[in-house]
Amino acid sequence: MTQADRKQHGQKSAVIVERLVRLQLRAMGCERFDLGIKRDAGEMILREEQAALDIETTIKWLRHENAKGAHVYVRPAGLHALSLIDDLSAEALKRMKAEGFEPAVVVETSSDNFQAWLKHGQVLDAGSSTCAAKRLAERFGGDPASADWRHFGRLAGFTNPKRERRLFSGMRPFVRLRSATGRVYSKAAELFVSIGANPNSEAGRGEESREQPCRRRRQRAGIRPLEEFHADSTYAGDLHRADMAWARHAARRGCTMEEIKDELLEGRDLSKKGSRKRQLEYAERTARKAIDQISG
């Protein structure tokens, strides 16, 4: 193969990878994604809150890292409406489709080994999201260790560098995009019932499943409800000040930034803040500032 042939082959490969990445991200349907690049030596590079277009512009760099042995992963940024089921067989995928749990995305990570992203049709809180992933993994024989709301899946178009996944030829298998419908699965309402979530509520969560870790901790550690701060005349109806006061109160009693952020997202209607991304940014900014203030 001449140098010109190699260059042409590389350009074609780049176009194919870009198309696969675009199809997968579009089917996942998130505003923002986190990229994880795990190098051969174990170093993990995180690129958080990436738009699909941001990821597409880094494909050349991702291919370079992948060629050196790095794993290329992706997950939704922040709270989301997806569950990843890892380590599935072809038979399990057939059963999922037959039983009304049709994946929005299916990625073949190595020969006859699959990951499936299921789309719930609404954003779930962290606890409900993890519960849903565990329930699905148990039902269809997925990897229980990968069943949580923040787990990474592989990005299609790159190779899988795991040594135990090598082909007979010794080459690394490509991660193949097997389907990308982007559809909500038929039995979403059934799953919500099984995990105690309410599919008819605005936030997609029933009272029982809405109980966040910080709310449970609040009961143990005497943390006052966020609603009390909202109703306190001290803040004269300024809910931003009330949120910050509660966040500092919760941080002093041991709530983590993630727990505070989740409680702020659940505690009142933040739609006036704009898009879901802006709401997440507000909650995270408030939680971070509260923790920084009590730490200082």
Image (spheres, rainbow, N blue to C red):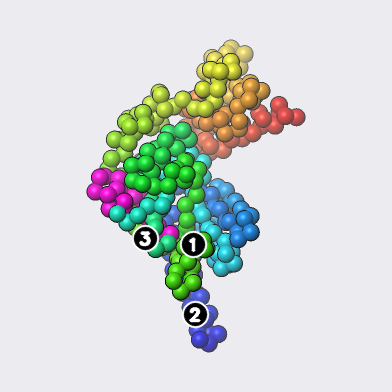
Where is residue 234? Give x, y as percent: 62, 13
Is tag 1's residue or tag 3's residue first in the polypeptide sequence? Answer: 3
Give the CA distance from mark 1 to mark 3.
14 Å
- Residue 261 visible, this angle: yes
From this viewpoint, which residue is outermost toward the top? 233
Q: To which residue does mark 3 refer?
A: 112
Q: Is residue 100 magenta?
A: yes
Amino acid type, mark 3:
Asp
Residue drawn at x 47%, y 41% as measured from the top left: 148
**Badge 1, how many Cα within 10 Å: few under 14, some, many 20+?**
few
Where is residue 177? Give x, y as percent: 39, 60
Judging from the image, what secondary structure is the residue with disc 1 in? helix
Judging from the image, what secondary structure is the residue with disc 2 in? helix
Magenta range? 92-109
Q: Is residue 115 magenta?
A: no
From this viewpoint, which residue is outermost toward the right? 296
* Mark toward the viewer: 1 or 3: 1
From this viewpoint, which residue is outermost toward the left? 98
Q: To which residue does mark 2 refer?
A: 8
